[in-house]
Image (tube, helix red, strand yellow):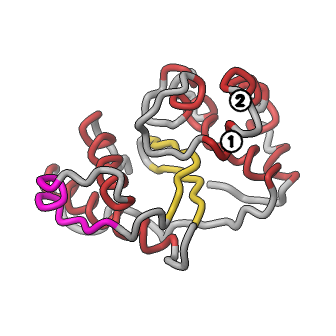
């Protein structure tokens, strides 16, 4: 089932993420959406991709607050918004989220490419024009987004990273990278 039915839905999901992270502290938004931000710098979003029926995040946990607290806060708030907007009741998200510990820099880099390749692998769009992913922030060096890009861009220039992601399409599509790290990613 699609969890985003239009641009406003994608926007509202990201708005809730920013509020939960304390990146958007507009009093009106906090009161209207009833989201209390987590303690400052609890998490860093390395990259993300929102797809019509799921999402991917690469998150660095900076404090002893579990990632589940962030995910639950964002998903609960978004579910209430979605159910109200589309006059529905019940669960929006099917299962608990899946989390995998990233233990090496190499794995982190390939995982970021996997996340950024999601629209292309799904046949939705070419990477450069898909606006519900952090990929554009990386290659265009946009600022003011939700991601801490320095973690990746300390290893690449923006052009080099764009090439790395694009060159990884075939290995990712054929599951060679996933097999290398012995992962099952859905």
Q: Position of residue 26 (x, y in %)?
A: 19, 51
Q: Which residue is at a point 46% across and 43% down the rendered structure image?
A: 50
Q: Could you tell whether 74 is left or right of 134 in the image?
A: left
Residue underneath mark 2: 161
Q: Earlier in the sequence, mark 2 or mark 1?
A: 1
Q: Relative to 63, is 46 above or below?
A: above
Q: Could you tell whether 44 is left or right of 72 in the image?
A: right
Q: Where is residue 59 in the image (x, y as percent from the top left)?
A: 57, 58
**Along the viewing direction, whichever of 67 and 91 lies nearer the viewer:** 67
Q: Distance between the residues labelled 2 and 1?
A: 8 Å
The quarter of the picture where residue 116 lies is top right
Q: Is residue 123 magenta?
A: no
Q: Does the magenta stretch include residue 29?
A: yes
Q: What stretch is highlighted in magenta?
A: 27-37
Q: What element carries label 1?
A: helix
Q: Is mark 2 on a helix, strand or loop?
A: helix
């Amino acid at each position: 089932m699609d969890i985003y039915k239009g641009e406003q839905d994608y926007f509202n999901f990201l708005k809730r993420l920013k509020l939960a992270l304390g990146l958007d502290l507009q009093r009106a938004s906090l009161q209207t959406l009833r989201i209390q931000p987590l303690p400052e710098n609890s998490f860093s979003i390395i990259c993300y991709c929102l797809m019509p029926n799921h999402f991917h995040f690469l998150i660095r946990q900076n404090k002893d607050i579990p990632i589940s607290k962030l995910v639950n806060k964002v998903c609960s708030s978004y579910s209430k918004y979605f159910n109200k907007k589309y006059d529905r009741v019940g669960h929006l998200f099917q299962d608990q989220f899946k989390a995998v510990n990233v233990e090496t820099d190499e794995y982190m880099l390939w995982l970021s490419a996997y996340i950024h390749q999601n629209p292309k692998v799904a046949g939705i769009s070419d990477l450069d024009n898909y606006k519900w992913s952090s990929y554009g922030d990386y290659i265009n060096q946009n600022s003011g987004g939700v991601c801490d890009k320095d973690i990746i861009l300390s290893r690449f220039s923006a052009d080099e990273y764009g090439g790395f992601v694009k060159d990884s399409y075939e290995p990712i599509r054929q599951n060679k990278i996933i097999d290398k790290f012995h992962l099952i990613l859905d």
